[in-house]
Image (spheres, coloured by chain):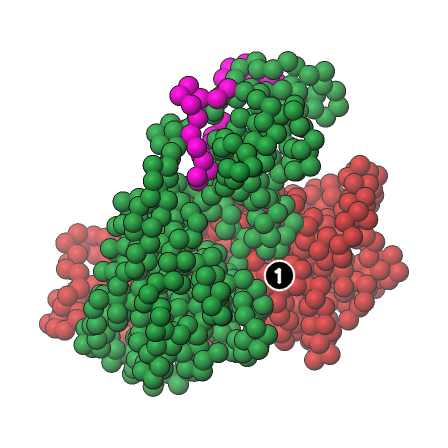
Chain colours: A green, B red
């Protein structure tokens, strides 16, 4: 824990900021945006954070990210910089992960109609790009070889009944492309990833292949967490298939009637690991015990460095505090940046934060999370009472300076959800979503996909909202 | 001119669309968005158009684009597909374009303070990345070699008075990064590009180097049109300098006090070329003579294939008509897609369209232009009476299905501006702008910079607006 005065650390910068301040005559929200877009500090932080690499919660890289967060917050001169313990599941992907569509597999169907125009049956083994879903068990040594049966909805799966026994179920319902908000499209398909293995096991399947959750046709495999229910079905391996390969497999099935795949995965879950949430703050001058949280999650999936998910949210929270500090502002209530650990694998960090003994003497005014990518901000969604929503909406003229057009009743965020159980209003930043699922949970979620200005606008939006919350309450 | 019935050409597609239509029960604007985002047809058209390459209005590639537009509109089954003549300036860049910062040039200034920490004076000649501004004269054979003097505002330039005589004036005022709308930042710097040569020549300068109009620090040179006023000053060559090189040159000047540059440009303007606007339409069933224009400009700068500027606007206009057609809609008033020629070099196409004899028996209800990049649409700006603005604003619930949040009084577009002189309401599509000036007028304006969904949403926004205008008038 460290309490460096920012003014002492970089007086010239502060003086300049204050001079620029009085000189410009612009209202505070515009000045906040100006600092964010001029310095592009959030993107510089993101370059550091993503350089650590992929950061699954139980990995050494996540531990390195914890240290980076503490060092960064101390260097920024935040107050009460510290970590709080979080215990997370230790799942590891393992070295071996492979699916092969076997040559000449299956009997050629008596294909007529459109299927007859499909690809010819594979004359040789064909690699299918797969990755284990998070939490999956591995396959036995030598893998699982079985016929594949494709379904796109649960009703079809259940109708398979005994005919699915011993097979690999291929869940191939695409995210619907027609939605304005791509999170709606995600919501219309991600049930396959979460529940596919459990529901396929109930009809006797030996493994599942799930179409990757993305709107793009790409080579990338998009992972994500999946869930077993041991009381309902035995555990079977679950893998995500790149969308290009899902289309190939589907075409081969249409052409041949059947296909055989060998799936090998070396993933396992040896136990748990202790890691940490990290946080630092601008302590409130009048109500230090009243807290506004700005947060993101510092863990990422293991396939990429998590630039959008959710390095972006972490550095936006940090930048928001930096901007307020640089403008010489002292908040009435405490504004705290929290880097939550383990959003991706069960949300242990969010729960640990909400229930940590350190919360006992604190009252949380509101918690704001950015976990939908570092794109141009458009909206805030408020999980709270109607008057709370109205109050945040009344700040739209200020929030609009960072591009926010609308405030709606809605979801806050996975990491801050546990705070809402004790009555804290939670608020989610909603950026433009068209590109998000090109990067989500795959190797493509890299720094170069994040535009520094779009990222900075999100930081500005969070800073403006945090300032309103700290000065006016909720 | 061709009048193919779309239904006759692709009956199966139309039947499917109509079935899908009655089946979905969604309101029309959502169905329009659904077609745009499912087919991503605009992006497929943009791939074809950008494959032609850079398309300056007087180039063979622009002629090829005219042919592409006619062929495409005919293949789409648009009605009254035809071209109308446009005469454009024939400016050519020429083979030789080079600026060299000369070794050990200038006397070392007695530098103290921050400048003393700058780069050492160049020990060898250093290439500076430049491109001629559009319309510039070339240099004499062997180039122009002169001392460089840097200014950031007109007042400083005028104060130079005789001390600028014989020098190269370096206009280095950056686009201010703090604005939410990057077009505001462009507006605060682009005067240097337009008027720099004329104003520097008035104080005796022999050439100008202008900092590229972009918010990024890059190697790309961003061109754009510049203007001479022969009655005020002699013509001198004008080049854009990559921002990285502008910073280098500025640092060298700060360090050394002076710098010498040799500038060579082979550009010239041999005359004029006749080319064309192209257009096709869905002819109105009740008021065929009442026209709603959807437009973009098909010419681009010569350094890149103009994917955002303005291939995007062209293919969005075409896609908007395709979507309405695919949904089996017959507009009451005519909806016409116009590919304007020569927005970049004086707007000859927009003027020719407004004044063509074919307009005599037509009444233009409104003209809508997309010329701010193929990004996620946010707004429409209406150049018209207050009641016209209010009427378009009343359609926000429909326009919102394609992401439009707001309708404001504002600018329509360069190509449709001449129509406003005879009272036509002009309307501009306003997409998200953070990334636009990374690509604008430079080699970086390529297909891969355009997200198919963001582009498609713009097409959907234009289709919804066109349908409202055609059915309800204005």
- Asked if residue A112 is positioned above or below residue A32 in the image, the reply reads above
Residue A111, magenta (yes or no): no
Residue A279 at x, y percent in the picture: 31, 64
Residue at 66 percent of width and 44 percent of height? B39
Circle 1 SS class? loop
The image quadrant that residue A288 belongs to is bottom left
- The chain identifier of the residue carrying mark 1 reads B
Residue B203 at x, y percent in the picture: 34, 76
How busy is the neighbourhood of tag 1: few (under 14 within 10 Å), some, or many (20 plus)? Answer: many
Task: Specify whether residue A168 is in view.
Answer: yes
Residue at 45 percent of width and 80 percent of height? A473
Residue A326 at x, y percent in the picture: 30, 75
**Magenta segment boundaries in residue numbering:** A117-145
- Asked if residue B318 is positioned above or below residue B259 in the image, the reply reads above
- Asked if residue A356 is positioned above or below residue A136 in the image, the reply reads below
Asked whether B222 or B185 is in front, the reply is B185
Instruction: Check disc 1 and report the residue beneath it.
Output: B403
Asked whether B405 or B351 is in front, the reply is B405
Residue A401 at x, y percent in the picture: 48, 74
The image quadrant that residue A249 belongs to is top right
The N terminus of chain A - image quarter:
bottom left
Task: Specify whether residue A456 is in view.
Answer: no
Asked whether A36 or B355 is in front, the reply is A36
């Amino acid at each position: 824990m460290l309490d460096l005065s920012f003014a002492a650390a970089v007086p010239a910068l502060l003086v300049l900021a204050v001079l620029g301040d009085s000189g410009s005559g612009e209202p505070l929200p515009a000045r906040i945006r100006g600092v964010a877009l001029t310095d592009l500090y959030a993107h510089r932080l993101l370059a550091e954070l993503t350089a650590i690499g992929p950061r699954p919660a139980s990995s050494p890289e996540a531990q390195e990210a914890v240290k980076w967060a503490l060092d960064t917050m101390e260097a920024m001169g935040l107050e009460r910089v510290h970590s709080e313990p979080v215990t997370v599941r230790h799942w590891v992907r393992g070295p071996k992960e492979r699916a092969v569509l076997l040559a000449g597999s299956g009997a050629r169907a008596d294909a007529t109609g459109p299927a007859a125009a499909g690809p010819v049956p594979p004359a040789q083994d064909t690699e299918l790009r797969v990755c284990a879903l998070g939490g999956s068990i591995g396959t036995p040594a030598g893998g699982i070889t079985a016929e594949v049966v494709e379904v796109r909805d649960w009703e079809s799966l259940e109708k398979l009944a005994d005919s699915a026994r011993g097979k690999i179920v291929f869940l191939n319902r695409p995210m619907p492309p027609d939605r304005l908000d791509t999170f709606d499209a995600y919501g219309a398909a991600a049930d396959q990833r979460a529940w596919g293995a459990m529901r396929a096991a109930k009809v006797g399947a030996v493994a599942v292949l799930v179409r990757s959750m993305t709107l793009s046709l790409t080579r990338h495999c998009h992972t994500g967490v999946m869930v077993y229910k041991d009381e309902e079905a035995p555990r079977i391996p679950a893998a995500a298939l790149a969308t290009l390969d899902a289309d190939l497999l589907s075409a081969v099935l249409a052409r041949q009637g059947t296909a055989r795949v060998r799936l090998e995965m070396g993933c396992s879950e040896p136990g748990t690991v202790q890691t940490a949430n990290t946080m630092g703050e601008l302590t409130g001058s009048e109500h230090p015990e009243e807290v506004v949280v700005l947060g993101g999650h510092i863990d990422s999936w293991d396939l990429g460095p998590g630039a959008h998910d959710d390095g972006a949210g972490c550095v936006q929270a940090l930048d928001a505090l930096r901007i307020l500090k640089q403008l010489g502002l002292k908040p009435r209530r405490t504004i705290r940046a929290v880097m939550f650990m383990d959003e991706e694998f069960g949300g242990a960090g969010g729960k640990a934060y909400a229930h940590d003994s350190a919360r006992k003497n604190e009252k949380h005014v509101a918690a704001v999370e950015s976990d939908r990518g570092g794109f141009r901000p458009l909206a805030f969604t408020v999980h709270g009472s109607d008057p709370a929503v109205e109050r945040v909406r009344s700040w739209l003229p200020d929030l609009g300076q960072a591009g926010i057009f609308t405030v709606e009743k809605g979801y806050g965020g996975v990491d801050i959800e546990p705070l809402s159980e004790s009555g804290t209003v939670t608020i989610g930043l909603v950026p433009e979503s068209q590109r998000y699922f090109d990067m989500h949970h795959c190797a493509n979620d890299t720094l170069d996909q994040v535009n520094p200005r779009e990222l900075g606008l999100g930081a500005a939006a969070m800073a403006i909202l945090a300032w309103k919350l700290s000065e006016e309450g909720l």
